[in-house]
Amino acid sequence: MIQFDKDPPTGSAQQRLEESEGRLKLLTDNMSQMAYVATSDMRVQWVNKRWLDYTGMSVEQINQGGWATIVHPDDMQEIGGSFEKAAAEGTRWEKEFRLRDQLGGYRWFLSISMPIKDEVGVVKQWFGTNTDITDRKLVEKERAAAAKSKDQFLATLAHELRNPLAPLQNGLELLEMTTGDAGLQQEARNMMKRQLDQLVRLVDDLMDLSRISHGHLELKLEEVDLQEVTAIALEALRATVAKARHHLHVEGIKGKLMVAGDRHRLVQVVSHLLENATKFTAEQGEITLALTSEDGSAVMAIRDNGIGIDRASLPGVFEMFAHVAAHDKKHGGSGLGVGLSIAKQIVELHGGSIEGLSAGEGKGSEFIVRIPLLAGSVGRSAAQGDSIPGQGPAKKRVLVVDDNRDAVFSMGALLRKLGHTVATAYDGQEALNVGAAFDPDLVLMDIGMPKLNGYEACARMRQADWGRKAKIVALSGWGQEEDRRLSKEAGFNLHVVKPIDRVTILQLVSA
């Protein structure tokens, strides 16, 4: 049973009142909100220490028209109208607005005022608090900007995907309608190849975007010559440059520029930068790719005399989904706005840096990449075992495995045209049987197949003598980190995402 002290409280009523007021003052002075009490017509009677510290205004100053000096001008009219309505109805008032501090800066507050009524319901006073919600407002603003950016990205993606699909469809129609016109058929095929390459690059960029967002972009490092990297990128973009009738100048140095790098990713960087220069430079414009070394780093500079970048936009060109206003105006917002961001991520993963320079709109652009050189690499002459430009790869025995017969036919025909010996299979079990008899140097195999999938087939191949010495590459439409992990555990040497271009095929058979 609870026992109460029956002794009367000590001290006079005045002392108890003073103690109570002291506790109330202690509470209100240390609360995080700004608090006030006002009359029914909103003449302030009392404010707490938090209010005085933030605004620097006393009760007298507020009542002498101070509200108009501390409430943001854009919020003042709406606040007055909404409070007049609450006062007339005698109801709770709640509003978000900005208040100025002593230094002239503004922060967002949630203001709540409660009416204090007498026994017949007449409002005698108002008690209000102002809670700082600036951080919440900033988060809301960032989320709104992210949502807008996502919507813009999805709209741009749909636009960019439709761009190559329309001419591809037209090309198929042309091939059917012009069977007797070899010249027009060849022109249609060239056009379709360009559009397919564009479609593949879009998909690759999306895959890289996902990897970068999740921190899963990994490099397969080896000794790489940047001279060779730029040569591969230039060859892949030769048709694009020729179509735009650009004057492309390449300035290199004697010997090699060896770095520890991922060959495929570095080719991707050069390709993105060259594509950017080509896209935003008028026909017959000047583009220069210069390679040199400086302070222990390989330096690659790509300059153009295109439309340039204004100073306000220059700091943000490497951000994801970035679009420069002048570029959008003249090129319809072309591209997903991820190429430069992906290039920056790849360069930084190599321990390097990339910067963009421009004197302004109409004055061209320059992008400079710096990557640390391997010790003693500059000017190294070609040693025995180095690849010699122009020397073709040795002919290989290649087993192509896929349940998509069109994919097998096209890959097999391309490899035979390049001089390799090819065998084919259409499921995992058939691949084991054919491989045992064919003894391939290289196996290009799909993952999702009947009877035995690619993972199971590869694991069994590795148990046989012919399979242990062969290079086995997964060709798959799936390219997430989990897919790559599974293929590595099954025994694949590489995991390559479909579709692959001729440059990649040449790299696979020459490695």
Image (tube, rainbow, N blue to C red):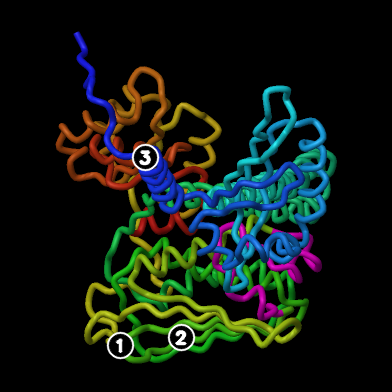
Residue type at mark 2: give it. Leu
**Which residue is tagged 2?**
291
Please tell me which of labels 1 and 3 falls first in the chain: 3
- Magenta stretch: includes residue 204: no
Residue type at mark 1: give it. Gly
Q: Secondary structure at mark 3?
A: helix
Within 10 angstroms of label 1, few (less than 14), some, or many (20 or more) residues? Answer: some
The residue mark sitting in front, 2 or 1, is 1
Marks 1/3 in contact by CB < 8 Å: the verdict is no
Disc 3 versus disc 2: distance between alpha carbons? 85 Å
Residue type at mark 3: give it. Arg
Say left or right for 277 vs 406: right
Say left or right for 90 vs 508: right
Please tell me which of labels 2 and 1 falls first in the chain: 2
**Spot occupied by residue 253 in the image (x, y as percentages of width and height):** 42, 91
Comparing 401 with 324, the one in front is 324
Quadrant of the rendered structure where residue 323 is? Answer: bottom right
Query: What residue span does the magenta drawing correspond to?
Result: 308-334
Marks 2/1 in contact by CB < 8 Å: the verdict is no
**Spot occupied by residue 462 in the image (x, y as percentages of width and height):** 19, 35
Comparing 380 with 215, the one in front is 215
Which residue is painted at 64% across and 36% down in the image? 114
Which residue is painted at 33% across and 21% down in the image? 452
Dominant secondary-structure state across the stretch colored magenta = loop
Please tell me which of labels 3 and 2 falls first in the chain: 3
Q: Secondary structure at mark 1?
A: loop
**Which residue is tagged 3?**
16
The residue mark sitting in front, 1 or 3, is 3
Within 10 angstroms of label 3, few (less than 14), some, or many (20 or more) residues? Answer: few
Say left or right for 373 vs 323: left
Quadrant of the image for the C terminus?
Answer: bottom left
**Which residue is tagged 1?**
296
